Amino acid sequence: MLTCLFHSTKNLYCSLNVINQLERLQRTLGYQFSNLEYLELALTHRSFSGSKNNERLEYLGDSILNFVIAEALYFKFSNAKEGHMSRLRASLVKGETLAKIGISWDLGEYLKLGSGELKSGGFRRESILADTVEAIIGAISLDQGREAARTKVLDWYADRLNELRLDQVTKDPKTQLQEFLQSRKLPLPVYHVDSVIGEPHEQIFSVNCIIDALPDAVSGTGNSRRSAEQNAALESLTQLGVIHKGRSI
């Protein structure tokens, strides 16, 4: 009987602790869920549960986020061309930006991760934080509708949107390099991963960029394959004299 009482008390304590955590996160988000199960699901990574996780909510939130930001840019920059607005949107909805939002919420403290992800530092992994932010947007949409999700996205992005300028975002180095080579009818660059070092949660990628316009392969490093490729392209542009030194991705 005492054992049962102990377990009942322990389970009650755990439940209250989870509720308190979710209440704290909701205050941070500036949003109160009518159905807390949506929020709990949004915080559940596939490593914790293969059948009941946040991937579907992430899919929904990603679509909502892209539309809301696209609409905001459309009305903010009435004379901007489609290509420029697309680059501005990409800078706002990319994983790095979403991860920064998640970090500002201390989102890693609330994630439900499997033991492997916990050991490898998944609670601070950029991709997991970014996906969870999108899942929370999807959760809000299911909880109180798309307009509620739109309102929160605009709230969370208010400072970024207010500070955004048309000349702030240029084409990324890979795109610049590709267009430079195409304009001279040269073959497109080829990227090869040279090495990957470090623990899973803090890997460093080294990538070689090979182009006919330079005698040797140009290397770039980054904490993801994408960033390493961008930095290799950036260094190639520098060696070609297209841009000046001092910029990094």
Image (cartoon, rainbow, N blue to C red):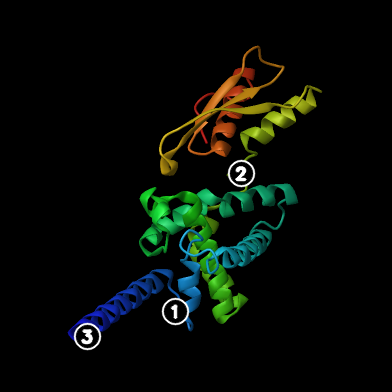
- Helix, strand or loop status at disc 2: loop
Amino acid bearing label 3:
Leu
Residue at image mark 1: 32
Q: Which mark is residue 167?
A: 2
Residue at image mark 3: 5
- In this image, 170 relative to 11: left or right? right
At label 3, counting other C-alpha atoms closer than 10 Å, the crowd grade (few under 14, some 14-19, many 20 or more) is few
- In this image, 122 relative to 189: left or right? left
Dot in front, 1 or 3: 3
114 relative to 209, above or below? below
Q: In front here: 102 or 198? A: 198
The count of marks equals 3
Q: Residue at x 58, y 54 (%)?
A: 93
Amino acid bearing label 1:
Gln
Q: In front here: 243 or 58? A: 58
Asked if disc 1 and disc 3 are in contact, CB closer than 8 Å, the reply is no
